[in-house]
Image: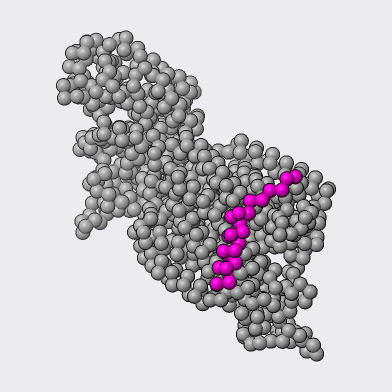
């Protein structure tokens, strides 16, 4: 194979880092104190944490450029809500409301059950709430219809008298009374009808809504909080009550950061313990306990500086960024292990500046490669249209920059000071000079009071037992021909399972996952799914043009559009003012076949049904410039698919139509999340490949790094699907992070492979594993330990973070210590001349 060299960047960098290491080794106190001062100054930004919080669910977890937001703007401007004629069907937002679902194992439509429900309804309506030294009830803030609070359909049908249920014949899903048709499916759930009829025989659930005016948010929030308190303290032996409000999801979501605050202390305690244990040496002089502790401290300073800087400059802080410290901790400790490993390969008899220079020469390039890839992958994530992803990527990326900076300054200074102690053969605790030989002394004296031993032949520190294992057992075993064949079969199985998982991957964020597991709203969503799962949303459709409704030929075009909608398997019914108007005109023998008659008689019709007046907008001349109708859908199709099909159907119509429902704001993520994720990751892979080609002096090894990225991402995506995780804005954050993480282990091994002075590819692989196998393993374990406490978190967000990081580390470790070394030997990467 032709020899190929791309070290025009590597050699100058090595020279630069060697000089930097010598400078840090010569002046450690400057490089120790400066990061502490910088961190203290930037840490003042935490004072503004509350001011920078930005946890609005719509802003952060829906695409900022989603078409539904444009649709909402059109409907809210063209069809403004009438405060005197409230209609939940016509709301362009979720609105302000409280709701409860009352369920029973038996028929809930009995006099006894309804008495309890009416009693609860009375308590809610008469609940007194204090505001501005005055008390108010529901009636004072309720959404009204002709000066009366909006009524609950089922309670209104029985005239708020339980015994009337025996005299009323309920029909499902629509209840007809006079000229009015009411959607009973919004109030009754778990309905059983009499055979071959629509007459209700029994029901297992009743849902009540309490809508509020939107003129005073403070009063509304106080009433909603009181509602939650009242219902949570109510109990009934025969009824189960679940409840929620329009603000519940937002309030519950804001509790999530508090659920992991206690986990920070546990995580850092575990990290410190692990670092100290893995940096412990039996030699009282050569032990790296203090370096291990300083490695954890260095990552803490990075988080303090990164968060503080962004808070100081006014960057919004989204709750998803709260998982950054867990990730930074693992990366920072990984860098520390690499530096310690390279330090141990230097000559003990050299001066501290010389040893640190050689350490930086080998370690800093490897750390630079991984940091660059991690940071760029995260910054590329900032191009996504999700605020939560942007916030996480920006906070994590800046923290990683500080982590890199502090690793080369603060941690390097700590290593230099520790090196000075080693050079003077001083004890790691007492700092008293101790003998290196314990001849004639007891074993206890040898264990506690001696140190400073090293290999007299190589003049280097003694090899760690695990490094010895990688060099003399694992490396030769992995490079054996039979093992290589087995590794290929193992990789084929891994790839097959990963691809299968990618094929069955589901998309979209279930909003209830934003709440904690023990939240009261989980029970509400479960009851709603169980008892009110047959019918879905009522989408509003705008006719955006001045349409001649009286023209029979033109009406055929509109009727054709309606038939197209109704032919969709999930559309159950069409509610349109012009259909009601035509029926009204027939009943009253009114002509509507000309423009003049149509518009003149329309006024009388709208007076008979004032709700429909909200569906028509006229020009100053009295012409209809726009109107809307509604499509009732069923829950037999995924909601995102419904939205896409409704939009496509509207686009195909000859009439200019626009479809919208408030839930579309959240469904928009389904239409872009996959394409956006793929685009971001492909861009990142290309950037990672470019960085590898520049910094790793072997193009084939650079391709191996790119291959590792793609392979690990495929595995993580596939196995997260098998683990029950959807592709949503939460998992997208972790997949973007995964791009950087997947580079780390493979880049370390690849760089060590091409830097090895050995000529035989098997020997180069063994050499790379001997040098970095243990640090890579340490880094993987430290990262997993850094996030393992999140596995017990009550938040879906943090549990998802743990699951994906766990997959990234496990698969990255397998690639770094198994797949990549074998593939490098098989493809015969060119060696590096010295």
Q: Is the magenta stretch mostly helix, strand or loop?
A: helix
On screen, residue 717 above or below 462:
above
Q: Which of 505 and 45 is in front in this view?
A: 45
Q: In this orientation, does residue 165 appear?
A: no
Q: Residue at x 41, y 66 (%)?
A: 42
Give residue 696's position: percent from left, percent from top. 63, 53
On screen, residue 577 above or below 248:
above
Q: Check the image and tell me how it is coloured.
A: one colour
Q: Which of 574 and 193 is in front in this view?
A: 574
On screen, residue 643 above or below 474:
above
Q: Does the magenta stretch include residue 2?
A: yes
Q: Which residue is drawn at 30% across and 53% down?
A: 222
Q: Residue at x 24, y 10 (%)?
A: 593
Q: In this orientation, does residue 129 appear?
A: yes
On screen, residue 425 above or below 313:
below
Picture mark count: 0
Q: Nearer the viewer, residue 260 or 402?
A: 402
In the image, taking residue 749 as reference, residue 379 lies left or right, namely: left
Give residue 614's position: percent from left, percent from top. 25, 29
Q: Does the magenta stretch include residue 378?
A: no
Q: Residue at x 37, y 23 (%)?
A: 574
Give residue 774's position: percent from left, percent from top. 70, 62
Give residue 429's position: percent from left, percent from top. 62, 82
What span is colored magenta in the figure?
Answer: 1-23
In the image, taking residue 128 as reference, residue 741 lies left or right, namely: right
Which quadrant of the figure contains the C terminus?
Answer: bottom right
């Amino acid at each position: 194979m032709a020899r190929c060299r791309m070290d025009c960047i590597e050699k100058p960098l090595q020279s630069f880092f060697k000089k930097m290491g010598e400078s840090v080794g010569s002046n450690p106190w400057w490089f120790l104190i400066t990061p502490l001062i910088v961190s203290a100054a930037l840490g003042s930004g935490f004072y503004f944490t509350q001011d920078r919080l930005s946890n609005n669910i719509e802003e952060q977890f829906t695409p900022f450029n989603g078409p539904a937001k444009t649709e909402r703007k059109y409907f809210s401007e063209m069809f403004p809500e009438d405060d005197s004629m409230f209609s939940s069907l016509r709301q362009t937002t979720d609105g302000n409301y409280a709701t409860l679902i009352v369920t029973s194992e038996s028929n809930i439509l009995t006099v006894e059950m309804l008495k309890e429900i009416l009693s609860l309804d009375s308590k809610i309506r008469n609940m007194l709430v204090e505001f501005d030294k005055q008390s108010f009830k529901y009636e004072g803030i309720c959404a009204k219809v002709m000066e009366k609070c909006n009524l609950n359909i089922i309670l209104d049908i029985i005239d708020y008298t339980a015994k009337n249920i025996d005299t009323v014949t309920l029909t499902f899903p629509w209840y007809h009374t006079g000229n009015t048709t009411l959607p009973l499916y919004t109030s009754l759930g778990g309905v059983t009808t009499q055979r071959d009829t629509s007459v209700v025989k029994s029901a297992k659930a009743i849902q009540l809504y309490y809508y509020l005016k939107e003129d005073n948010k403070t009063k509304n929030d106080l009433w909603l909080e009181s509602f939650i308190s009242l219902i949570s303290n109510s109990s009934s032996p025969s009824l189960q009550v679940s409840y929620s409000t329009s603000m519940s999801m937002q309030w519950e979501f804001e509790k999530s950061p508090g659920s992991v605050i206690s986990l920070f202390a546990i995580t850092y305690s575990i990290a410190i313990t692990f670092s100290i244990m893995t940096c412990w040496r039996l030699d009282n002089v050569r032990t790296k306990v203090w370096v291990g502790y300083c490695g954890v401290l260095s990552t803490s300073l990075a988080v303090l500086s990164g968060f503080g800087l962004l808070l100081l400059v006014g960057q919004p802080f989204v709750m998803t960024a709260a998982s950054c410290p867990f990730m930074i901790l693992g990366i920072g400790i990984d860098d520390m292990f690499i530096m310690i490993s390279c330090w141990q390969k230097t000559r003990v008899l050299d001066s501290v500046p010389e040893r640190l220079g050689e350490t930086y020469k080998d370690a800093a390039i490897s750390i630079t490669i991984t940091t660059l890839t991690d940071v760029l992958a995260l910054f590329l994530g900032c191009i996504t249209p999700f605020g939560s992803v942007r916030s996480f990527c920006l906070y994590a990326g800046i923290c990683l920059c500080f982590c890199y900076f502090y690793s080369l300054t603060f941690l390097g200074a700590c290593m230099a000071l520790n090196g000075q102690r080693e050079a003077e053969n001083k004890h790691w605790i007492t700092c008293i000079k101790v003998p290196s030989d314990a001849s004639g002394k007891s074993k206890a004296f040898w264990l506690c009071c001696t140190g400073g031993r090293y290999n007299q032949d190589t003049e280097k520190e003694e090899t760690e037992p695990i490094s010895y294992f990688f060099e003399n057992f694992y490396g030769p075993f992995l490079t054996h021909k039979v093992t290589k064949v087995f590794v290929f079969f193992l990789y084929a199985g891994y790839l097959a399972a990963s691809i299968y998982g990618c094929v069955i991957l589901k998309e979209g964020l279930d909003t209830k996952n934003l709440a904690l597991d023990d939240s009261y709203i989980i029970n509400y969503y479960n009851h709603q799914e169980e008892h009110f799962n047959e019918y879905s949303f009522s989408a509003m459709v705008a006719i955006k043009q001045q349409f001649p409704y009286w023209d029979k030929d033109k009406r055929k075009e509109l009727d054709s559009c309606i038939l197209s909608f109704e032919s969709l398997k999930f559309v159950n019914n069409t509610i349109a003012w012009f259909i009601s108007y035509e029926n009204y005109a027939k009943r009253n023998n009114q002509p509507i076949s000309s423009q003049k008659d149509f518009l003149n008689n329309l006024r009388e019709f709208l007076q008979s049904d004032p709700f429909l007046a909200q569906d028509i907008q006229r020009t100053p001349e009295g012409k209809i410039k726009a109107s809307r109708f509604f499509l009732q859908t069923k829950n037999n199709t995924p909601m995102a698919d419904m939205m896409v099909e409704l939009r496509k159907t509207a686009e195909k119509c000859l009439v200019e139509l626009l479809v919208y429902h408030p839930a579309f704001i959240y469904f928009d993520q389904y239409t872009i999340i996959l394409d956006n994720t793929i685009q971001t990751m492909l861009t990142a892979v290309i950037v990672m490949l470019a960085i590898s080609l520049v910094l790793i002096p072997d193009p084939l090894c650079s391709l191996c790094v790119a291959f590792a990225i793609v392979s690990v991402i495929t595995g993580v995506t596939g196995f997260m699907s098998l683990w029950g995780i959807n592709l949503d804005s939460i998992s997208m954050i972790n997949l973007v992070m995964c791009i950087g993480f997947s580079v780390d282990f493979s880049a370390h091994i690849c760089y060590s492979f091409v830097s090895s002075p050995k000529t035989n590819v098997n020997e180069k692989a063994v050499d790379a594993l001997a040098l970095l196998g243990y640090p890579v393993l340490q880094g993987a374990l430290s990262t997993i330990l850094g996030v393992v406490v999140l596995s017990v978190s009550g938040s879906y967000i943090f549990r998802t973070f743990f699951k994906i990081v766990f997959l990234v580390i496990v698969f990255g470790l397998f690639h770094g210590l198994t797949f990549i070394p074998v593939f490098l030997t098989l493809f015969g990467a060119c060696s590096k001349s010295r």
